[in-house]
Image (cartoon, rainbow, N blue to C red):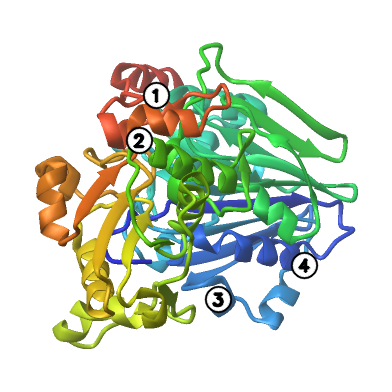
């Protein structure tokens, strides 16, 4: 993770096994595969059909769970979560899964996304006596479900999804059920898999592969999936459904070996490189990609142009989000610690470097300087996505608009700022062509047009009805 990249959202994983598998260990490996979606905290909750047990902590999955921790999490079903804090501060209280006890028993939730009306709902819930233990919008969802639990689980969930607005991919665990819920626009991903006779729900198909399972399908927008001993069933919570998956899942967030809503992430990034060449052909000696998310697009550009692809930046794989530079000078040089130039591939050459995005521009400037200092004759830069001009409200931690270089400078001004000989971005039509699968996408960070606005009045009416 580099200083001016967009931060991930979260990752969720759940398994219903009827006690045939070591569900805590399977969830652990599933979360390991989703670690790229959040590195601040992680947790696992298990059910033995009598009670729910939970273990969570701050840090990476491997840092939080020991073998003894996993052995203590005895159960037949489980859910897990890896978190990056897009709503609520980064502390142990906000780590998930979050548990609550209500009329239907114990319920645990793990949530990826962001509610646009969370603060309004929270205020109204507090007015009716609800006490919150965290600052997350996930607890708002859980309290809404608990509030309606006297009507039964299914009714409580449908009432809740009517009230909440925004993005959400949710896995929930009760004493005897595993539940998956996806928002009506399908902004955040959620999919279904099988491991022998057991069912899996998770953010990305790569987590199903990691535990030896088989990908079945994506959870559809507005779909609620309920899994118990009787099997799996689902129903829709809305008639007005329009799939608008976050385009940045394909550009940067998802692992390249995942398939989301029928689109192979690696191939989509590769096609972005093809289209980028069609829109912005250039003469150079070597194409290179910023590791890791710029590599597939760089390979695609190389294929389309016939110009050879080669490595120029070597990534230190042992430095993650937990890396702390002890002084201001070292913070400024942190890119040199994370990435080093492969001088034998660079010296005397005209290099085209491709990255997935530019947010603030600080990292791009350092990378251009790194290649020049390694002897590059020319350094050109291209971006396999349109300029990021607007903040995201659906689970991506985007800087304020004034901090987005794409919102405050022209492309020529950005080129001068980062020191590249040329700079080009993929256009919005070009991105849509690369992603073409008959799908529609949320492009809010590029064009400021968002699929959801907070419907305050409906939320108020919902809570008034429940009083």
Circle on res. 279: 2
Q: Secondary structure at mark 3?
A: helix
State which tag comes first along the sequence, 1 or 3: 3
Image marks 4 and 2: residues in contact by CB distance under 8 Å: no
Is residue 252 something one can see in this rendering? yes
In this rendering, position of residue 74 left or right of residue 351: right
Q: Classify mark 3: residues with Cα within 10 Å, few (<14), some (14-19) or many (20+).
A: some
Q: Classify mark 1: residues with Cα within 10 Å, few (<14), some (14-19) or many (20+).
A: some
State which tag comes first along the sequence, 2 or 1: 2
In this rendering, position of residue 107 left or right of residue 38: right
Gap between marks 2 and 1, in whole Å? Answer: 51 Å
State which tag comes first along the sequence, 4 or 3: 3
Measured as percent of width and height from the top left, residue 248 is found at 42, 43
Image marks 1 and 3: residues in contact by CB distance under 8 Å: no
Gap between marks 4 and 1, in whole Å? Answer: 37 Å
Circle on res. 463: 1
Q: Secondary structure at mark 1?
A: helix
> What residue is at 49 percent from the left and 46 percent from the top?
112
Residue under label 4, please give it. 74
Quarter containing the N terminus? bottom left
Residue under label 3, please give it. 64
Q: Classify mark 2: residues with Cα within 10 Å, few (<14), some (14-19) or many (20+).
A: some
Q: Quadrant of residue 279?
A: top left
Gap between marks 2 and 3, in whole Å? Answer: 46 Å
In this rendering, position of residue 8 left or right of residue 370: right
The mark lying in front, picked from 4 and 3, is: 3
Q: Is residue 76 above or below residue 229?
A: below
Most extreme residue toward the bottom, as rendered?
326
């Amino acid at each position: 993770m580099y200083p001016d990249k967009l931060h991930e959202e979260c990752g969720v994983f759940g398994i219903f096994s009827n006690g045939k598998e070591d569900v805590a260990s399977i969830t652990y490996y599933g979360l390991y595969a989703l670690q790229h979606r959040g590195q601040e905290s992680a947790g696992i909750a298990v059910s033995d059909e009598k009670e729910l047990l939970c273990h969570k902590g701050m840090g990476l999955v491997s840092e939080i769970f020991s073998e003894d921790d996993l052995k203590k999490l005895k159960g037949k079903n489980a859910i897990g979560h890896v978190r990056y804090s897009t709503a609520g501060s980064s502390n142990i209280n906000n780590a998930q899964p979050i548990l609550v006890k209500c009329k239907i028993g114990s319920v645990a939730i793990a949530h990826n996304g962001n509610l646009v009306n969370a603060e309004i709902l929270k205020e109204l819930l507090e007015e009716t006596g609800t006490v919150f233990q965290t600052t997350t919008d996930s607890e708002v969802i859980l309290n809404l479900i608990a509030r309606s639990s006297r009507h039964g689980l299914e009714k409580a969930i449908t009432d809740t999804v009517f009230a909440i607005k925004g993005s959400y991919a949710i896995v929930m665990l009760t004493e005897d059920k595993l539940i998956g819920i996806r928002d009506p626009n399908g902004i955040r991903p959620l999919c279904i898999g099988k491991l022998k006779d057991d069912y899996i729900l998770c953010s990305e198909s790569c987590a199903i592969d990691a535990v030896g399972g088989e990908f079945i399908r994506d959870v559809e927008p507005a779909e609620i999936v309920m899994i118990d001993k009787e099997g799996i069933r689902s129903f829709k919570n809305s008639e007005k459904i329009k799939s608008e998956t976050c385009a940045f899942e394909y550009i940067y967030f998802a692992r390249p070996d995942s398939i989301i809503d029928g689109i192979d992430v690696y191939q989509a990034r590769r096609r972005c490189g093809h289209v980028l060449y069609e829109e912005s052909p250039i003469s150079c000696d070597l194409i290179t990609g910023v590791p890791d998310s710029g590599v597939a697009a760089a390979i695609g550009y190389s294929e389309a142009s016939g110009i050879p692809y080669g490595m120029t930046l070597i990534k230190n794989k042992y430095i993650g989000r937990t890396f702390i530079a002890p002084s201001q000078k070292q913070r400024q040089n942190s890119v040199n610690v994370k990435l080093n130039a492969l001088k034998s591939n660079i010296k005397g050459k005209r290099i085209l470097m491709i990255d997935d995005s530019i947010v603030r521009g600080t990292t791009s400037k350092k990378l251009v300087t790194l290649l020049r200092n390694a002897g590059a004759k020319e350094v050109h830069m291209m971006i396999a996505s349109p300029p990021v001009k607007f903040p995201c409200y659906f689970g991506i931690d985007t800087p304020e608009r004034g901090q987005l270089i794409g919102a405050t400078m022209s492309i020529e001004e950005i080129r001068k700022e980062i020191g590249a000989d040329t700079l080009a971005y993929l256009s919005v039509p070009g991105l849509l062509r690369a992603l073409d699968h008959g799908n529609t996408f949320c492009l809010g960070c590029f064009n400021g047009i968002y699929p959801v606005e907070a419907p305050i009045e409906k939320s108020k009416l919902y809570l008034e009805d429940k009083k």
